């Protein structure tokens, strides 16, 4: 099991300013941005990082590198950036895919596949957004939270299964 | 198939247009939003279907396997696994766990498939269907048709937006009612309607 807090601490220590001059030129980290943002409590897996295993934690996660295994961040958001390549099942509050994902997604609130996203897997979520240009192969299943509730107005390009008492009059 | 030729009419050159599709929307509207719906769309996944089902309780199967189906080589010495095995691989409907599909959207794909591939596809779909399962498809009735399937999207005005990405035509398979019933067995034509652009839409059900 990989603890995101541990990753955060390890990577934060590595990028301390006074150590920058000691990092060799061929050090594989290419991103100059902070890996951990204290402001929005989001951790990042850099573009050159490869992780095999189970990822869990209590903060949002941005994946720019490679992850293979499982990702469980209940109540938090996972973003797979354009450079991210993930082969894992993901459980999170909101999942945004801009890169590549091979695996299933369980989104508590929403799953968004951006135009650059490439997904091969199945989705269970109350709402799914598929932008034009996105590649998706798999199934999309709605999992109503409270069946029988009045349906909200649908957002563009979204699939909502949480509330379905009113029929769409498209 | 007939040799390809360039388009030669104004209507054919209009690569993007909207059309009415009464049988398709009739089939969609017959689905109850209050019960779990199983729908298979053989076109590449697009947002319009998600928009339409925004308020439905449903499971959408979007295998995105159109190109793979089109490229299947049915030659005897092709070295490929049997078509039935290929279908199960391309269309992972085992996730349906025995629940039959309610609606299958074939769009214009049957016009472009090798007949043995189409038969294998229909046989595979039959194993995941019930008497209530509805198949919808478009058939080209003119002698020629675009040499690649079109992209079809549902609009909020209950029309279908058609986009043809090729400027070339080829011979159409010349489907007629009896042939459709034969090729689509065990499904049979329930309703058919000729559309303004020469496409005929069909609703098929299990016999």
Image (tube, helix red, strand yellow):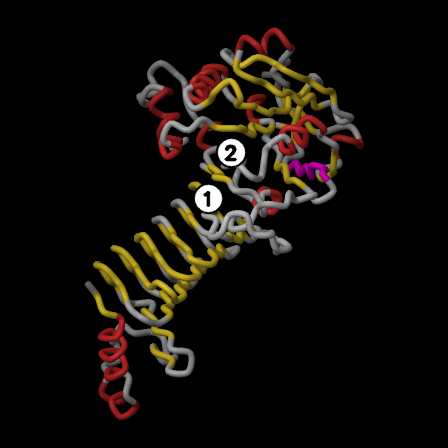
Q: Chain of mark 1?
A: A
Residue B121 in magenta stretch: no
Q: Residue at x 36, y 65 (%)?
A: A63
Number of the label disc, if any, that sits on residue A140 = 1
Looking at the rendered structure, the secondary structure element under dot 1 is strand
Outermost residue, left side: A1
**B171 horizontally vs A54: left or right:** right
Position of residue B51 measured from the top left corner of the image (x, y, whole percent): 61, 47
Looking at the rendered structure, the secondary structure element under dot 2 is strand
Number of the label disc, if any, that sits on residue B104 = none
Position of residue B107 measured from the top left corner of the image (x, y, whole percent): 59, 29
Q: Residue at x 46, y 44 (%)?
A: A140
Q: Which residues are magenta?
A: B158-164
Quadrant of the frame with the N terminus of chain B: top right
Tag 1 and tag 2, C-beta contact below 8 Å: no
Say if A111 sits above or below B166 in the image: below
Q: Residues within 10 Å of mark 2 (few under 14, many from 20)?
A: many
Say if B57 sits above or below B66 in the image: below
Q: Residue at x 24, y 73 (%)?
A: A7
Say yes or no: labels 1 and 2 on the same chain.
Answer: no
Q: Quadrant of residue A121?
A: top left
Q: Residues within 10 Å of mark 1 (few under 14, many from 20)?
A: many
Position of residue B152 measured from the top left corner of the image (x, y, whole percent): 63, 37
* Number of numbered discs overlaid on the protein picture: 2
Q: Residue at x 34, y 78 (%)?
A: A36
Number of the label disc, if any, that sits on residue B39 = 2
Residue B162 in magenta stretch: yes
The residue closer to the viewer here, B21 or B133, is B133
């Amino acid at each position: 099991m990989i603890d995101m807090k541990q990753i955060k601490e390890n990577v934060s220590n590595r990028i301390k300013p006074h150590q920058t001059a000691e990092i060799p030129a061929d050090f594989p980290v290419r991103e100059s941005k902070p890996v951990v943002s204290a402001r929005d409590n989001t951790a990042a897996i850099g573009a050159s990082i490869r992780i095999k295993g189970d990822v869990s934690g209590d903060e949002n996660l941005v994946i720019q590198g490679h992850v293979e295994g499982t990702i469980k961040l209940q109540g938090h958001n996972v973003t797979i950036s354009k450079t991210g390549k993930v082969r894992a099942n993901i459980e999170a509050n909101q999942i945004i895919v801009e890169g590549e994902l091979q695996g299933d997604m369980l989104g508590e609130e929403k799953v968004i596949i951006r135009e650059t996203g490439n997904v091969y897997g199945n989705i269970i979520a109350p709402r799914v957004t598929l932008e034009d240009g996105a590649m998706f192969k798999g199934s999309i299943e709605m999992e109503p939270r409270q069946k029988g509730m009045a349906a909200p107005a649908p957002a563009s390009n979204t699939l909502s299964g949480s509330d379905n008492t009113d029929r769409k009059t498209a | 198939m007939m040799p390809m030729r360039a388009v030669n009419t104004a209507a054919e050159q209009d690569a993007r247009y909207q059309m009415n599709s009464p049988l398709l929307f009739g089939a969609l509207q017959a689905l109850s939003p209050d019960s779990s719906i199983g729908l298979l769309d053989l076109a590449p996944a697009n947002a319009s279907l998600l928009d339409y089902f925004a308020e439905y309780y449903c499971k959408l199967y979007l295998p995105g396997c159109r190109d793979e189906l089109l490229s299947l080589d049915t030659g005897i010495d092709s070295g490929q696994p049997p078509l039935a095995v290929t279908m199960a691989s391309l269309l992972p409907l085992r996730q349906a766990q025995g629940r039959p599909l309610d609606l299958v959207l074939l769009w214009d794909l049957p016009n472009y498939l090798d007949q043995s591939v189409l038969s294998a596809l229909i046989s595979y779909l039959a194993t995941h269907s019930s008497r209530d399962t509805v198949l919808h498809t478009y058939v080209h009735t003119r002698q020629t048709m675009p040499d690649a399937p079109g992209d079809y999207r549902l609009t909020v005005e209950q029309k279908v937006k058609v986009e043809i990405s090729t400027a070339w035509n080829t011979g159409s398979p010349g489907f007629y009612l009896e042939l459709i019933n034969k090729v689509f067995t065990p499904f049979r034509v329930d309703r058919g309607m000729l559309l303004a652009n020469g496409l005929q839409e069909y609703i098929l059900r299990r016999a």
